[in-house]
Image: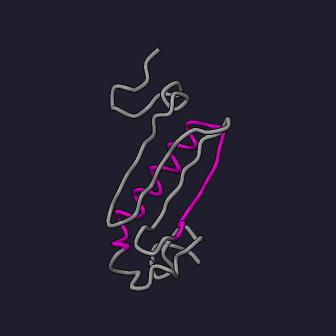
Amino acid sequence: MRTHTASGTPTAYGYDCGYQDVDEWKGITTRLYREHGCYHIRQHDHRTGTRLAWERTTSLTEARDAYARLVAHIHDTAYGEWCADPTLCAGRGYCPRDPNCAD
């Protein structure tokens, strides 16, 4: 069985074997992994030690979509510039100063 797709992301079997998708940007880590029968998508701000998001699903398609959305949001919204105080974002999964996000 293959552990990775042609694009390099883990397959369902790959996630079962412990492989992960990880994106690190400006002190923020977004991670997609499988544990206890479901996929976890977690995002942490290591500058403040806060969790920005933690989503869970049993669908690999939904997990990949959520991972891509969180990674794109952090990269596209200039998080480091808009969140002078990253603790404001803790637990919300987005920056409240980001005009592209609804409160």
Q: Residue at x 47, y 57 (%)?
A: 70
Q: Which residue: 40% across, 26% down?
A: 4
Q: Residues in magenta?
A: 50-79
Quadrant where the C terminus is found in the figure: bottom right
The colour mode here is one colour
Q: Residue at left 48%, top 75%?
A: 95
Q: How many marks?
A: 0
Residue 18's place in the image compared with 66, above or below, is above
Magenta includes 69?
A: yes
For residue 86, what is the image quadrant?
A: bottom left
User: Where residue 101 sits: x, y (%)?
Assistant: 51, 73
Residue 56 in picture, x, y percent from top left: 64, 49
Q: Main secondary structure of the magenta part?
A: helix
With 82 as the anchor, is 11 left or right in this view?
Answer: right
Q: Is residue 83 left or right of residue 25?
A: right
Residue at 43%, 23% in the rendered image: 3
Question: Is 68 situated above or below 10?
Answer: below
Residue 51 location, quadrant: bottom right
